[in-house]
Image (spheres, rainbow, N blue to C red):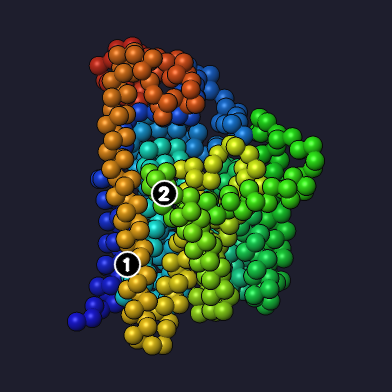
Amino acid sequence: MERTPGRSTLACLALLLAVPLLCLYLNPYPDILLRDQWRMVPLLVDYFSGQLRISSLFAPHHDVSIVIYKTLFLLNGILLGLNMPAEYALGIFLLFLYTCVLFTALRRSLGGNASVTLLVLAPLLAVIYSQSQTVLWHFSLVAVLAGVLLFFSVLTVVFLDRHLEEDGRPRHAVYSLLCLLFLVLGDTTATFITLIALALLLGLLWFLRPETRKKILPYAGVLFLFFAAAGTLQFFYSHKLHPAPPEGWLLHFLTNIPLIINYVFLLSGSSLYTSNIVDNIPRPLLWLSGAVVLLAYAGAVWLYIRHRRDIGSSLPLFLILFSAAFAAVLILSRATTTYGPPTAPRYVTPMRVGFAGLVWIYGHWVLRLRSPSWRRGSLAAGLCTVILLEGLNLATAQRYNTFFYTALKQQISFLKSQQYDKASRPLAPGNGVRVVAKFDMELRRLGLGHYRDAENPEATEAVQAAP
């Protein structure tokens, strides 16, 4: 018996809520700082000593500004005693909000039919939560930044769509640009990716929807100002600039075309799998996977152009363009260097953002097939492919997660016993074990992080002395 629309809506909402809760349950996060988070401990030291300056939040972190994360890190230390599992939960919550925005736009794209939406939502959630993988699961800093980026990026496009559809005051355009401003404060490099994807989207909409050109033009002008602002910040915060090669950039890329092609196929192919699987996959198979991914993207863009009026939202196209923009930036900055191989885990998550757009567009197309047999067969094949692949990714990442969590629990015992020489590389920023030793002493004195203990008199005295 077919479900009523009310029950289907409840099933969609239950699925939206159950997946992140299951993710939190299956992936306990250790109460310990990792990598670059150690370099932010001085923010809390300055706060509790009454010497914190607002300019410290805008200080460069490598070659980017992450004002929003630093603010959240500071508030976490002040209000929660630097509770890292809570920070990780915030990242998952932002990912949940991102899926809610996609669900709302997807349901609208499918005519408000919750039963049909559920068929596309299930593989969509599998793709989204698989993209978190081991990098996001094991580093709350990345979880929060990824959540902020994804949530506010899609909100930007949703408000842009509303602005192009409605007449009257440009309030939705203002909302969209406010989301962009929030992104600039979040991560200047990630904002560049979003701005490039938005610029590409506006360029396509200029040709696909000529009736909206009068609204696109002023929005594009403001977007250019955002490019200028983000570029200025990036230049100001960049601690190093890559010098141009002796032969010039154009000749440099032309002479390295085979290397660039190899990079593109490996980057696309590795985005299909979790980082723990990629290392065991032969390069020819990664090449073949890359070709399949690139063809799938090309087909999805072609389908979107043909059925753009039926799909309605430009969000799935933006998601694909986001991954394309990220790949383009990587190719220009990494393809001809030895820094950051295309199979590096930190590149997988942004490259998988476009997969949500693929599922949306192909799901919409399959559900609109006229032949019932073709529709059922294509839907079954698509669901089985996505669920099997993402199930393999999630299962592999889950096994690694258990090992990683146990190892980090042991690291906490090393820190508490001051055996800093045993601190592992995943714990320290780069090879800076001395940084861990220095700031772990400060956490001990303030009773923060893994030293949250109400019976610690030294910590109590230090915290009470704070302004």
**Image spot of residue 423 (x, y percent):** 38, 20
**213, 457: nearer the viewer:** 213
The structure residue drawn at horizontal position 45% and vertical position 61%, both measured from the top left corner, is 356
Q: Do we see residue 458 in this rendering?
A: yes
Per the rendering, the mark at residue 384 is 1
Label 1 or label 2, whichever comes before in sequence order: 2
Q: Quadrant of residue 451?
A: top left
Which of discs 1 and 2 lies nearer the camera? The answer is 2
**380, 3: nearer the viewer:** 380
**Image spot of residue 193 (x, y percent):** 60, 51
The residue that disc 2 covers is 281
What kind of residue is marked 1? Cys
420 to the left or right of 434? left
Q: Quadrant of residue 64?
A: top right
**Image spot of residue 63 (x, y percent):** 62, 34
Q: Residue furthest left?
A: 1
The structure residue drawn at horizontal position 27% and vertical position 67%, both measured from the top left corner, is 11
What kind of residue is marked 2? Ile
Q: Compared with residue 159, is residue 55 higher up or lower down, i.e. above or below? A: above
The structure residue drawn at horizontal position 35% and vertical position 86%, both measured from the top left corner, is 372
Element type where label 2 sits in the image: loop
Category of crowding for the residue at label 1, using alpha-carbon neighbours closer than 10 angstroms: few (below 14), some (14–19), many (at least 20): few
Q: Residue furthest right?
A: 247
- How far is mark 1 from mark 2, CA to CA? 21 Å
**415, 15: nearer the viewer:** 415
The structure residue drawn at horizontal position 35% and vertical position 65%, both measured from the top left corner, is 385
